[in-house]
Image: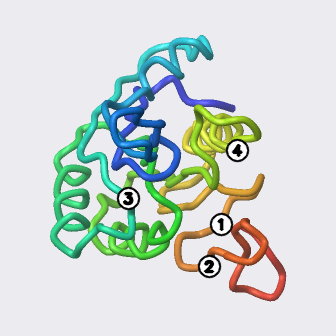
Amino acid sequence: MTSHEPLVFISCGGTIEKVYLPSSGTLGFDHSRVEKWLTSARLAPPWRCETLMLIDSLEMTAAHREALAARIAELPERHIVVLHGTDTMTESAQTLMLRRKADQVIVFTGAMVPAGLENSDAFFNLGLATSGVQLLSPGVYITMSGRIFAADQAQKNHAEGTFESTKPNGSK
């Protein structure tokens, strides 16, 4: 059974939020599009979005992770989805395991291909994270590649462009 408690979506950037910037001819950030995506998906209220930072996760430092942990610790809501770059997602998720409130459900997600590009996994991953955050027990999780992982049991497989379990028997 799904919860009707408020959901919070916090964007940290990552590939999921990258767009083509014509001025530089590169992928980068201009503003978060998460609220637009959730509105387009007709996500039932109550929910809200926050943009904490828009950076590539390879540029994320311990100070960025601490800022994320501090912000989540301040939230009154229990159900939180974090949009994050995939390269250091597991590191940030594990930081949150140590800092979250006992009743919080925190689900990290991202994308291997930016949401605005063809063949992106962004919306599928965001949908899975949105469902998961409402159904999972308190804890910190990663939803990628159609699977849900405990934050300390996931790793990115760079060669395959997927996430996989660090445990022999698979996902949660």
Q: Taking 20 as reference, is 73 left or right?
A: left
Dot 1 lies on which element? strand
**Alpha-carbon span between mark 4 and mark 3:** 17 Å
**Alpha-carbon span between mark 1 and mark 3:** 22 Å
Dot 3 lies on which element? loop
Residue holding disc 3: 56
Residue 97 lies in quadrant: bottom left
Q: Residue at x 69, y 59 (%)?
A: 148
Residue lying at the far right of the rendered structure:
169
Dot 4 lies on which element? loop
Residue holding disc 2: 153
Q: Earlier in the sequence, mark 1 or mark 4?
A: 4
- The spot of residue 13 in percent (x, y) is 38, 47
User: Which of the two residues, 34 or 2, is positioned nearer the viewer here?
Assistant: 34
The amino acid at mark 2 is: Gln
Residue holding disc 4: 121
**Alpha-carbon span between mark 1 and mark 2:** 6 Å
User: Which of the two residues, 96 or 57, is positioned nearer the viewer here?
Assistant: 57
Is there a contact, CB below 8 Å, between mark 1 and mark 2? yes
The amino acid at mark 4 is: Asp
- The spot of residue 24 in percent (x, y) is 35, 42
Residue holding disc 1: 149
Structural crowding at the residue carrying mark 1, measured as other residues with C-alpha within 10 Å and reported as few (<14), some (14–19) or many (≥20): many
